[in-house]
Amino acid sequence: MKLASFLGAALMLVATASFAQEEEEPAPPEAPAAAPEEPAAEPEARAPEVRAPEPPAPKPKARVVRVAKSEREGADVEDEPVEERPAHRLGFEFGTRLVVIQDASFDPYAENDLLPQAMIGIGYMPFSIGPAAFGIIGEYDVGTVSADARGVPSSLLLQRMAGGVHAQIELWRFQLYARAMPGAIYAHATLDDDGVDRALASDGWTWVMDVSGGARFRLASADERVVDFWLFGEGGYSLTGDIEMAFAPPVEENDPRSFGQLKLPALHPSGGTARFGFALSFL
């Protein structure tokens, strides 16, 4: 009986131990319970939330572009006044030139000391510094006077061709300028002597040097100052050489006669000058 009781107790212990082991073995599977650590994926879920605000980032870029554009537009606006009109390079003048010749050699040909001439001029200003411009200018003048030389009708035609340098500065609607112009003068004089069937004539050349200064006033402009219209006035002095005045009738082929010369004092047409008229200037 005791043996049977002992064996029964041993079996009970073994069964209890095996049952206890079966209950303890499930513990290892708890390792997968670490899977709840999946919350680590929460950052992945949060990542979209962090990236979601990123789309607004382009807005500042758009602003930068707008600012740059506005700056360029502003630069264009500021550049417009900088693109000032260059000084007019080409110009034409039309008017009257007066020479006061007080030398006695002029008296046989004029009733007073004044020689009026029509004039035309052209200028080209290739160099400019701010309102100042420098260049070259040419001019042609022609005028005639008449009188009685000791009871003999006389006339004198003077032509002047000159070219030189010109400097000017523009102040508001005014231009102040100075010029120096060397050149040549051609004189043609006649005497109508009743004792000869044709007029006596004398021709000659001499040098001339003019120095003058003046001012222009801009009357109007056209095509945004592509063309300007001016009034001008100028004063100066004309220094010349002497022209020999030896009169003789023109020679004709079929006329066997020969004529001598009638000499008058050499003409010295130096004197003070004045010019006034109208001018055009172009870009």
Image: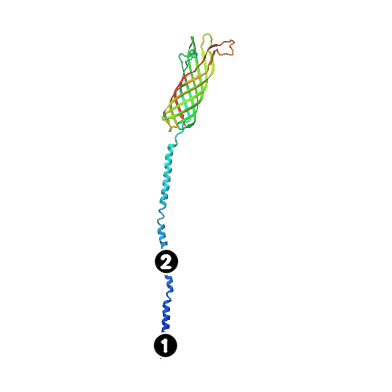
Q: Is residue 255 left or right of residue 86?
A: right
The figure's colour scheme reads rainbow
Q: Is residue 228 above or below residue 41?
A: above
> At 41% from the left edge and 58% from the top edge, which residue is drawn?
50
| Residues under numbered marks 1 and 2 in contact, where contact means CB atoms less than 8 Å apart | no
Could you say where residue 6 lies in the image, as x and y percent from the top left? 41, 88
Determine which residue is flagged by label 2.
38
Query: Residue 215 is drawn in which quadrant?
Result: top left
Q: Is residue 224 above or below residue 192?
A: below
Q: Which one is in front, 162 or 121?
A: 162
> At 40% from the left edge and 60% from the top edge, which residue is drawn?
46
Q: Which one is in front, 10 or 274?
A: 10
Could you say where residue 227 lies in the image, as x and y percent from the top left? 45, 30
Determine which residue is flagged by label 1.
6
SS at mark 1?
Answer: helix
- Mark number for residue 283? none
Label 1 sits on what residue type?
Phe
Q: Which one is in front, 72 or 28?
A: 28
Between label 1 and label 2, give the one nearer the viewer: 1
User: Label 1 to label 2, Cα distance in Å?
Assistant: 53 Å
